Amino acid sequence: MFAVSKGKPKRTLVLGHGAGGGTGARDLQALAQALPARGTSVVLVEQPWRLAGRKVAGPPPTLDVAWIAVLEELRRAPQFTGLLSPSLIVGGRSAGARVACRTATTVGAVACLALSFPLHPPGRPERSRVDELLGTGVPTLVVQGERDSFGGPPEFPPGTEIAEVPGADHGFKVPARAELGQAGALALITDAVMEWISAL
């Protein structure tokens, strides 16, 4: 899926989904709907393992190889002519964020967006994945729910550029009683991402 900005895009954001879902995730959809009007084309990538009908993602090296191949194909595909800007930003949610972080410099990205970065498995902070986040080699924004069981905002190392979503869990769902509300949480995400992108 892709969403095209009006006129020539200033930048392109390519996003991958997580291990437990597809491109229909609320944060991915919100970004795809909001950013094109602000000059950023958005491409949502359905991961190859999911297209193959598998229910479980492959190991990290396999995911990285597939992601790099997808980015190469996007650059060559006629239907994306005029959509992909030279200013490429990669990202994803959860497992997709990990892939984007590990491959950002390889694919020539100028920045990386990590939505719900899984800093560690739930309840296992000793199994940190912080090296993946710190090793992107490009400016990186983390957008993290306050109640994310894979690592809350305070668990990230000092200096991490992070946008916190109050009350949100790993899927950016907020409780029904939350003052922010679900629509407000998604607006916070899109506004934070656009502000960060505009400052690159």
Image (cartoon, grey):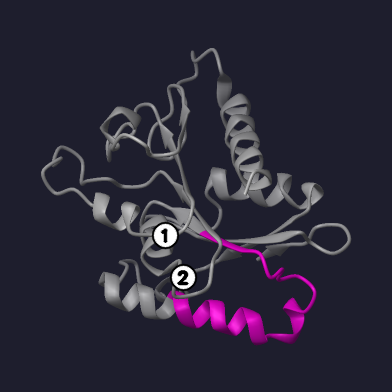
Give the answer, above or below, for where 28 lies relative to 67: above
Residue 49: % across, % down: 40, 75
Left or right of 118? Residue 88 is right
Local SS, label 1: helix
Q: Which mark is residue 154?
A: none
Q: Which kind of residue does numbered mark 1 sit on?
A: Gly
The answer to which of 80 and 131 lies nearer the viewer is: 131
Q: Which mark is residue 96?
A: 1
Q: Which residue is mark 2?
A: 47
Q: Hey, which residue is sitting farthest left in the picture?
A: 126
Give the answer, above or below, for where 171 lies relative to 19: above
Disc 1 versus disc 2: distance between alpha carbons? 9 Å
> Which of the two marks, 1 or 2, is nearer to us in this view?
1
Left or right of 80? Residue 52 is left
Q: Determine if residue 86 is in view.
A: yes
Give the answer, above or below, for where 179 lies relative to 95: above
Instruction: Say how many tags the image has.
Output: 2
Crowding at mark 2 (Cα within 10 Å: few <14, some 14-19, many 20+): many
Residue 40: % across, % down: 72, 55
Disc on the earlier residue, 1 or 2: 2
Q: Is-magenta flag for residue 93?
A: no
Q: Which kind of residue does numbered mark 2 sit on?
A: Gln
Asked if disc 1 and disc 2 are in contact, CB closer than 8 Å, the reply is yes
Residue for point 22% across, 46% down: 120
Q: Quadrant of the N terminus?
A: bottom right
Residue 154: % across, % down: 30, 28
Residue 36: % across, % down: 76, 52
- Please report the bounds of the magenta region as a residue range: 67-90
Left or right of 35? Residue 110 is left
Residue for point 75% across, 86% down: 78
Residue for point 10% across, 43% down: 126
Local SS, label 2: loop
